[in-house]
Image (cartoon, rainbow, N blue to C red):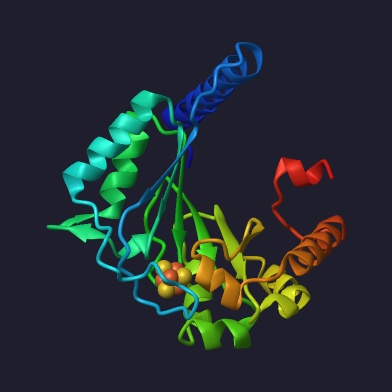
Amino acid sequence: MQTDAMALGGFTLMNKKLFDWLAYGFKTFVLRKESPYLFGMVITDKCNLNCFYCESKNSGRYHFKYEEARKALHDAFMRGHRSLYFTGGEPMIWEDRGHELNELVRFARDIGFLDVFIFTNGTVPLSIEQCNYIVTIDGPKTVHNLIRNNSYDLVLKNVENAVTRAVFCSITFSKSNASYLDQFVKEVSATKLFRGISFNLLTHWPEVVKEYGLPPNEREERLDRLWELRKAGYPIVLSWCRLAH
Ligand code: SF4
């Protein structure tokens, strides 16, 4: 049952969000002062999967210590960032001497971040509260399983049991899955487990993009098709830039 205090807490948070967005809009659009909003933290490059196109996993280059992570979050907040995402590697498996990601999410919310997102491959239970999840899926079940070690059923089970319904999914287009776009969107939408579907293109490593990425004309085609699917009612998340197209 919702208590008055909880209702008041929700109301206050909504007001705070609204106030922060208005203040940010005023600073950016009226005063024309550039101000950072979104802060991304690669908390670790450790990962429990082995996607063929991924050059960043388990390189041993990134792994925050707990205190470093807290300081980075605090500094980002002081610079004006209000929205935060954790990525990796697989951020849900990050730990440092007994500290786990849920502590950093709680810390970020306590100091005032308004939104916290976690990019995850979904193979670990989505049990952290006070955040949104963006679960990466690499195509319809058969394609995803080929790329991501037969994890499709496990991922959907974890999404179904997530502590929040604020779960989005995201697909990274490569030569191996781009032709399954329609099948992917229809299959994932039919689960009714995701609030929205977003998309990425392979962009990180030039040699990987050259070998596995889509050529520019095919990228355009896929984006046009996404736009059509969105107009047909599928929950595609596109940028305002694209919406104005
Ligand atoms: S799940 Fe993400 S970090 Fe892990 S191997 Fe795949 S692309 Fe790389």
Q: Is residue 75 left or right of residue 53?
A: left
Q: Quadrant of ligand 1?
A: bottom left
Q: Position of residue 119 (x, y in %)?
A: 46, 58
Tell me the quarter of the image containing the C terminus.
top right
Q: Is there any visible trace of residue 229 in the rendered image?
A: yes
Q: Position of residue 142 (x, y in %)?
A: 61, 88
Residue at image point 31% right, 37% down: 73
Residue at image point 28% right, 58% down: 62
The correct choice, above or below, for 113 with respect to 158 in the image is: above
Residue at image point 53% right, 80% down: 152
Q: Is residue 141 left or right of residue 127?
A: right
Q: Is residue 163 left or right of residue 69?
A: right
Q: Position of residue 181 (x, y in %)?
A: 74, 73
Q: Residue 67 occupies which quadrant of the picture? A: top left
Seen as rendered, the residue at the extreme left is 97
- Count of numbered badges drawn on the protein: 0
Q: Residue 34 occupies which quadrant of the picture? A: top right
Q: Is there any visible trace of residue 160 in the rendered image?
A: no
Q: Position of residue 26 (x, y in %)?
A: 61, 15
Residue at image point 25% right, 44% down: 69
Q: Is residue 160 left or right of residue 94?
A: right
